[in-house]
Amino acid sequence: MSELRWHPLLREWVITATERQDRTFLPPKDYCPLCPTRPGAFPTEVPAEDYELVVFENKFPSLAHPPAQQAVSETELYKVRPADGVCEVVLYSPTHDGTLTDESEEEIRNLIEVWTDRYIELGALDFVRYVFIFENKGQEIGVTITHPHGQIYAYPFIPPVIRRELDAAREHHGRTGRCLVCDIIGEEEKDGRRIVAENDSFLAAIPFFARYPYEVHIYSKAHMGSLPGFSDDQRWDLAGILKAVLTKYDNLWHKSLPYMMVLHQNPTDGENYDYYHFHIEFYPPYRTKDKLKYLAGSESGAGVFINDTLAEEKAAELRKSGEIADVE
Amino acid sequence: MEMKKKTTKISGGRTLIYYTFTRGQKKTGAKKQCPS
């Protein structure tokens, strides 16, 4: 059973998805459901002996079309809506023991092509308002299958974090006539201390306002709202800067660094969002090599992040971290 | 670079898509160095 329950205090949707309690949890390598199906071995989700990139509908979705049966009826105060949408899994590689960092620039370039295709196809569905592409990496983040993969949620509404960014960008544009993210890029370039990596088309920085110690944002230098607008050269540059940031993360402490990676793009509800600006955000959960940053009372209960570090110092660490893989 | 898609159905009537690629030409150009 699954539904959207309206949170009247926060004015946002909560998804209930009870079947997900039964989802696969850290299976042994020989029974990984995301590996190719080897001859004579158990059948995985992918009925092929090999693959390059694969996308499939999640077996344990939070959102589905047609939506799952609702467990409750709504009242005047407690609104309920169908959990209508799509949840997809994106397999980066047939190799079980790998991460996105291990992929070549060309393979990441191919992944960007897949992201773009899914953004267009899912965004064209009449019940989808927002296509959210993301990756949870590492058991510290709550990953239940370690095979390298990302996810896509096609929501029937604009998620609240995106809504807040859109409102801020629209207000800034109305007041100044400029793009808010373009101005953020300008501030970061002017200061320089928080820049982590850069190429012709993208800037990677731990921004002034970072909430996590190693929170890197990747901004497109051109004012673009979503992946389909990027040129071939820009897609290569996005692959290049992703590879650079991912490698720096792993080289920081010579271990594979867990993170959440999220793509922020225009909604797909048919409205005009010319004032918004594509970017990728990373939230690694570590504040030191062996200490996690927890979302505790202030962060979870008040929405106020406490960052124990200075973005200027953490960016300097990542700048020094090499772009050649050096992981134990 | 050319991308091809092949769609099939898996358990539960779910859709699975195989993506394959021909080798692409990487852009050329100097990489900017970030300030140290």
Image (tube, coloured by chain):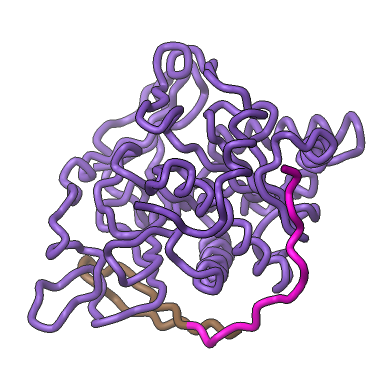
Chain colours: A purple, B brown
Q: Is residue B31 magenta?
A: yes
Residue A241 rendering spot, x and y as whole percentages:
63, 57
Q: How many marks?
A: 0
Q: From the viewer's perspective, tell me whether residue A305 is left or right of residue A295.
A: right
The residue furthest right is A177
| Quarter where residue A123 is shown | bottom right
Quadrant assignment, res A192: top right
Q: Foreground: A296 or A240?
A: A240
Front position in the image: A75 or A26: A26
| Residue A213 visible here | yes
Q: Position of residue A54 (x, y in %)?
A: 38, 71
The residue that appears at 29% across and 76% down in the rendered structure is B9
Left or right of A212 in this view: A15: left
The quarter in which the N terminus of chain A is drawn is: top left
Q: Is residue A314 above or below residue A303?
A: below
Tell me which residue sits at (38%, 54%) in the image: A87
| Residue for point 53% across, 16% down | A306
Q: Is residue A271 visible?
A: no
Identify the residue shown where x is 44% and y is 23%.
Answer: A7
The x and y percentages for residue B20 are 45, 82
**Eyeballing the image, is B29 above or below A81?**
below
Residue A74 belongs to the span the image colors magenta: no
Task: Read off the magenta span.
Answer: B21-36
Q: Position of residue B6 (x, y in %)?
A: 41, 83
Front one among A94 and A25 = A94
Magenta region, mostly helix, strand or loop? loop
Residue nearest the viewer, comparing A95 with A120: A95
